[in-house]
């Protein structure tokens, strides 16, 4: 009686079946989705494009400016997407620093990196931010390290073209004029173009000690 040998490759076929369809579809396994700031910004861009059918043709249009919108009090601002390195979905715990300005909330440990946490409303308008579930922290780079800016709300990605900015107006509030280069109206919302570079280079922002 002749012994029947298993067909060559059967074991490898079983291993392929056990792995499922990942190798066939090219889709990443659960748990391998990109995380962090870039994933969040990419999600904002995806949703923005999904709600604006005409925008894909404008992605490489001259004069297109991509920004992240946020609210501080009753003012809406936008800053260049390249000016914001990370977005924290909730304010981290902070360690207060004595003899500093009220707008410097303290120092926070974010994944092993120390960042200064600033209440942006307190700095701009001398009004304390009441933290709600909508509050976010925008992490921006400055000389000597990163700084986190506490804002009332994130309003997502905004894409401005030269046409959008054709009727832009200046900033009437003297306390904001250094940081807000222009104001653009999109629909019913007035957006102030906020320069993070000007903010982090402002002498009073760099010297928080009393």
Image (cartoon, rainbow, N blue to C red):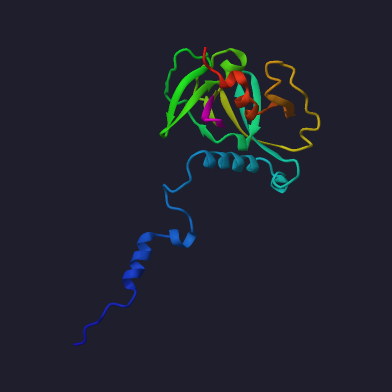
Which residue appears farthest toward the right when viewing the image? 166
Query: Picture coordinates of residue 46 (x, y %)?
Result: 60, 43
Instruction: Answer left or right for 15 relative to 50.
Output: left
Q: Hey, which quadrant is residue 2 in on the image?
A: bottom left
Residue 52 in the magenta stretch? The answer is: no
Q: Quadrant of residue 20?
A: bottom left
Magenta stretch secondary structure, dominant? strand
Q: Nearer the viewer, residue 97 or 78?
A: 97
The residue that appears at 57% across and 39% down in the rendered structure is: 41
- The one nearer the camera, 46 or 169, is 169
In-image side of 101 versus 185 (left or right)? left
Which region shows up in magenta? 140-149
Q: Is residue 148 above or below residue 21?
A: above
Q: Is residue 101 above or below residue 8?
A: above
Residue 91 or 204: which is nearer the viewer? 204
- Where residue 33 appears, as percent x and y from the top left, is 47, 47
In the drawing, does residue 171 fall left or right of residue 104?
A: right
Furthest toward the bottom, the residue is 1
Q: Position of residue 77 (x, y in %)?
A: 65, 26
Residue 144 within the segment the image draws in magenta? yes
Q: Which residue is pictured at 53% across the width and 21% down the height?
A: 118
Image quarter where the N terminus lies is bottom left
Q: Residue at x 28, y 77 (%)?
A: 6
Q: Which residue sits at x=62%, y=37%?
A: 81
Measured as percent of width and height from the top left, residue 30 is found at: 42, 49
């Amino acid at each position: 009686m002749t012994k029947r040998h298993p067909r060559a490759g059967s074991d490898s076929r079983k291993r392929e079946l056990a792995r499922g369809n990942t190798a066939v579809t090219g889709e990443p396994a659960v748990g391998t989705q990109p995380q962090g700031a870039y994933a969040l910004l990419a999600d904002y861009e995806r949703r923005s494009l999904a709600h604006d059918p005409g925008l894909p043709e404008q992605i490489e249009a001259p004069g297109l400016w991509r920004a992240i919108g946020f609210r501080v009090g009753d003012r809406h601002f936008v800053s260049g997407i390249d000016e914001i390195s990370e977005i924290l979905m909730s304010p981290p715990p902070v360690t207060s620093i004595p003899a500093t300005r009220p707008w410097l909330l303290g120092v926070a440990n974010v994944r092993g990196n120390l960042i200064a946490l600033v209440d942006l409303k307190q700095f701009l308008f001398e009004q304390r931010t009441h933290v709600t579930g909508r509050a976010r922290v925008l992490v921006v780079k400055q000389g000597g390290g990163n700084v986190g800016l506490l804002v009332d709300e994130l309003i997502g990605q905004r894409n401005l073209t030269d046409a959008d900015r054709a009727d832009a107006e200046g900033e009437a509030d003297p306390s904001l004029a250094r940081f807000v280069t222009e104001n653009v109206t999109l629909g019913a919302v007035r957006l102030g173009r906020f320069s993070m570079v000007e903010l982090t280079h402002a002498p009073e922002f760099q010297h928080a000690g009393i």
